[in-house]
Amino acid sequence: MKKVYAICMALVILTSASFTGCEAVKNTNKAQRGAAIGAAGGAILGGIIGNNAGKGGNGALGAVLGGVIGGVAGGVIGNQMDKQAREIDTALPGAEVVRVGEGIKLVLGENAVRFDFNKSTLTTQARANLDKLVSVFKEYPDTNIVVYGYTDNKGSVEYNLKLSQERANSVKNYLISKGLVASRFTTTGMGIADPIESNDTDAGRSKNRRVEFAITANEKMIKEAEGK
């Protein structure tokens, strides 16, 4: 499981007057770590999203995950997201799960969510893999989920944009049919945008045909974390 942790960096940068290195991090409590990470969230997140962009974009997803709540509340939310990320990884080992700031980036390639050629209908395999995520999403109801659909570059830009939107909608509708609340979901078709591999090879195009999730705290989770 790929996770992005910058605890040491955040604490060293923000609390250099008190902490002189990673060894000092061990002596802090969760509230202190959460506050430090939250305060440094903007800088850390900028680096994370920049690295992702270097691999092929993810600008839209980065914008969603780029919101920083910060402080102790951000640390509380981060801890909950850590748990959810671990459970997603356990439920669906083939997925790419990345903790970004106070949210989760989840990438489902064709090995996890496959569509028939030129169609937006979920295959039996895709439905089975999405079923594995349903129980985790139900366990953490206070999150919002944006579903992004992507394609390779074969065909026109306009056609691929439409197809990617239909595929994102198929994923959302299937998850809703399994009992998840519709208001949690937003969908966006990205078409050929933000390739993560070269479209010059079959293997690269296969990886670009994917679905991504941006999982963030909803208003209820934020208020509870803030003690309101």
Image (cartoon, grey):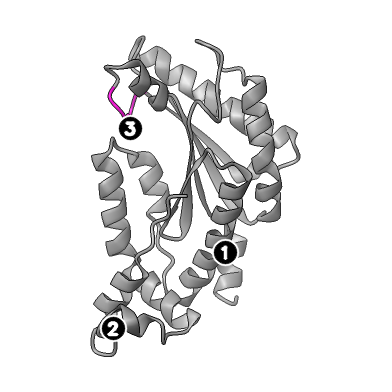
Secondary structure mainly formed by the magenta segment: loop
Q: Amino acid at mark 1?
A: Gln
Q: Quadrant of residue 132?
A: top right
In the rendered structure, does residue 2 fall within the stretch colored magenta?
A: no
Provide the residue span drawn in magenta.
Answer: 192-198
Who comes first in sequence, dot 2 or dot 1? 2
Of label 3 and label 2, which has the lower sequence position?
A: 2
Mark 2, residue position: 15
Crowding at label 3, few (<14), some or many (≥20) Cα neighbours within 10 Å?
many
Location of mark 1 (residue): 80
Q: Position of residue 106 (x, y in %)?
A: 49, 43
**Extreme residue in the bottom direction:** 18
Placement of 186 over or under 101, stated as above or below: above
Q: Secondary structure at mark 3?
A: loop
The kind of residue tagged 3 is Ile
The Cα atoms of the two marked residues, 3 and 2, are separated by 36 Å
* Residue at image location 47% in from the left, 55% down from the top: 103
Quick one: SS at disc 1?
helix
* Marks 1,3: beta carbons within 8 A: no
Q: Mark 3 sits on what residue?
A: 196
Q: Residues within 10 Å of mark 1 (few under 14, many from 20)?
A: some
Amino acid type at mark 2: Thr
- Residues 55 and 42: in front is 55
